[in-house]
Image (spheres, helix red, strand yellow):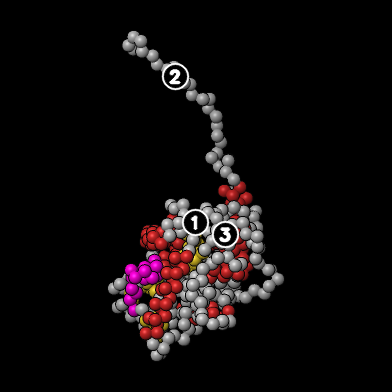
Amino acid sequence: MKSGSSSAPPVPAPPHKSMGSPYDQLPDTAFWRTGVAEQAPDVIAGLYEPKFPITPETRIMTAGSCFAQHIHRNLAERAWSVIDTETPAKALPARVLRQFGYGLYSARYGNIYTARQLLQLIKEAYGEFSPAEPVWDREGRFYDSQRPNIEPDGFASGDQVIEARTHHLAAVRQALGEADVFIFTLGLTETWLHRATGTVYPMAPGTLAGTYDPAHHGFYNFTLPEIMEDLDAIRESLHALNPDMKMLLTVSPVPLTATGVERHVLQSTTYSKSVLRAAAGGFCAGHADVDYFPSFDLITSPAAGDRFYAPNLRSVTEEGVSAAMSMFFVAQGAEDAVLFDQSAPQSDEDDDIICEEALIEAARR
């Protein structure tokens, strides 16, 4: 050491203190026994802790698979600011409105089962995409291939289909332009598409309308990376319209009616729901403006037993829907959060839910 130099004395290490297990300091919600097994299945504390507030004044746009209709209906029934830009010119009974695709979502697009289908719709609304085979026919009637179930008896001509779709896309643009929060329910990984262009359809050609041609139409099962890419593209499109727009993702708890993969439908359901849940969770974790609402987790929890599914093991009971929506409203601080009346009669089938996928099974009877 050179003359005049100095150095600080060594600092002794603190005395060793055992921290025990890293699980020792975790809350009750981190453990299965206290977080699930000892909880009431319809009120699992801490399951949904919102990233951002959604209030009755928040302008909400909804879309997704069949289960998303429950979300839209519950928001509308409580006079929350759920957007609906496509309504009929005259008053009609509620059942007729639902049959013709009104009031199910923020516009009359029917069920949107995959992230690719939603991305396709947004791009089409702004002139960035044109679907292949936009018109399907059946027995002299004509149908919109992107929403074949919104006119049960079809249109009189293909021109009427195109005219109605032009009006519909304007309503989609209006809804997108008004939204503060976009709620989207992921339903399926499986889809049917036009081979040459990649256009996806909400149902296989030939199921309700159109003609299935294996030379032009094919089955496709989206992977986790593809769904993540589509969600990213959807978010970018929404932010191009409103940089402050937020997304709330959910996953439908409704199993597949049928699978296009050569394996048991239970395996396909497990695959699809697992991939969608992973996509929703992963995408939410990567963005502060994207949240995940765990209705799927609540309804499929083993704590619920058979309470949340009808005897067909597919339709979600009103008790299950109410449990999920109560969780949403409680977490968001709403006053009218408890929804389910156990004295009300329950149906084995949810006749109020319009679901193209269910037509696959109906066609076999």
Drawn side of residue 108 relative to residue 120, left or right = right
Above or below, 29 against 334 in this view is above
The picture places residue 347, in percent across and down from the top left corner, at 62, 75
**Residue type, mark 2 in image:** Pro
What label sits on residue 291 in the rendered view? 1
Residue at the farthest right position: 343
Disc on the earlier residue, 2 or 1: 2
Q: How far separated are the C-alphas under marks 3 and 2? A: 57 Å
Dot 2, how many residues are within 10 Å of its Cα: few (below 14), some (14-19), or many (20+)? few
Disc on the earlier residue, 3 or 1: 3
Secondary structure of the residue carrying tag 2 is: loop
Q: Nearer the viewer, mark 2 or mark 1?
A: 1
Dot 1, how many residues are within 10 Å of its Cα: few (below 14), some (14-19), or many (20+)? many
Asked where in the image residue 221 lies, by quadrant, the reply is: bottom left
The picture places residue 353, in percent across and down from the top left corner, at 54, 75
Which residue is label 3 attached to?
55
Which residue is label 2 attached to?
10
